[in-house]
Image: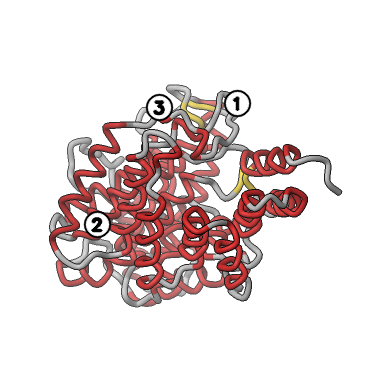
Amino acid sequence: MPETVGSDVPIGELLRNLTPQVIGIVARRFRDFAAAEDAVQEASIAAVMEWPRDGVPENPRAWLTQVAFRRMTDQIRSESARRRREIELAEEAARAPEPAFDATSQQDDTLVLLFMCCHPALTPASAIALTLRAVGGLTTAEVAHAFLVPEATMAQRISRAKQTIKESGVPFQLPTDEERAERLRSVMHVLYLTFNEGYTASSGTQLRRADLSHEAIRLTRILRSLAPDDTEVAGLLALMLLTDARRVARSGPDGELIPLERQDRTLWDREEIAEGTALLAGALPKGAVGSYQLQAAIAAVYDEAARPEDTDWPQILALYELLKRMADNPMVSLNHAIAAAMVHGPKTGLDLLDGLMGDPRIAGHHRMDAVRGHLLEMAGEAEAAARCYRAAAGKTGNLPERDYLLMQAARLGPHP
């Protein structure tokens, strides 16, 4: 069992929720993002050591902030080459009283941090990677998994992004309307990836990380309040809600994975489905349709089916064909192959999978083997399907996913 503090909240979960907020406070005060992140990391380590012994502070965010302030002050004082301006800034921060936080304030430092990380000084890929690390709380390995690149490559990308932020002197504040428009697409992509990691974790013993998916939904709601007329923001929020609505039915009493076709659909959250459907219905007539709206439309078709056999696969296939033309994304192509198989038969889907084998972004991904196994099973090739399921199980870091895939292989018989 994880160690907990106060209200039975696990230390790791509490720190993950507080970290981006505290990074925002420290970065705002010291104007050094990379150093602020390091200082907050040290404060988090101190919390892990002290809170189980001494108890959680009444205001844990203020506690972490003060410890991080002291770390920053010590660091600046120890560097004699620093300009006097920096020393004075550190001393001012050290003299400041414990910050008071207004629970009713509309200021959300997490969202400010999100926009800062998506600054145009960074390439879109670097901005997204840095934000997932600093705001989403993902490990470097999890970010690398989301981007389908090696961990070492992602570590270098994040390091360079931090240095770019430091050298650019980016002010820690919400961007202007013009700047917000420039960064909005990167921010949306970050929230999308964060939600996906929460909905199906890339590694660990739990199928999902509810803290990440819920935070992504919360921040997307705030983003929509900042851009109420942006139909893609509405589409993104609709996609999250229509997908999250199935979360309870996705796992059994022991945390095991339950695939869509076997889920108890009475457990689906009808309020989330209604909200997501209303958002989508309001966004679609207003102008050009973007990729998030199309993905939300696909999720809505799934949610509309009372039974698996009621699923409108031709409509889903048509939507994926539109999405494929709009986005060069191998996961979209993979899902398109599934839809094509459901409409035209497994051979069509398998032929489309063969065309994806040359794409290095997905060729070694466990979902390629899992989907191939599913389509081979549909085609009656049990032995080949079992081999694919076992291959997929060996490539995923998510334990419930792995167990499900191994069960699928075992169900098809004891093939070598």
Residue 36, image x, y percentages: 42, 58
> Residue at position x 46%, y 40% from top?
15
192 horizontally vs 279: left or right: right
In this rendering, the answer to whether 59 lies above or below 92 is above
The secondary element bearing badge 2 is classed as helix
Name the disc covering residue 254, or none: 1
Q: Which of marks 3 and 2 is nearer the N terminus?
A: 2
The secondary element bearing badge 1 is classed as loop
Q: Which of marks 1 and 3 is nearer the N terminus?
A: 1
User: Given the image, on which type of amino acid does mark 2 rest?
Assistant: Val
- Eye-nearest disc, 3 or 2: 3
| Residue 270 in sight from this viewpoint | yes
| Residue 73 in sight from this viewpoint | no
Name the disc covering residue 373, or none: none
| Residue on which the image places disc 3 | 267
Q: How crowded is mark 3: few (under 14 residues within 10 Å), some or many (20 or more)?
A: few
The secondary element bearing badge 3 is classed as helix
Residue 169, image x, y percentages: 32, 73
User: Given the image, on which type of amino acid does mark 1 rest?
Assistant: Asp
- Image quarter where the N terminus lies is top right
User: Given the image, on which type of amino acid does mark 3 rest?
Assistant: Leu
> Residue at position x 55%, y 39% from top?
207
Residue 363, image x, y percentages: 63, 68
Name the disc covering residue 233, or none: 2
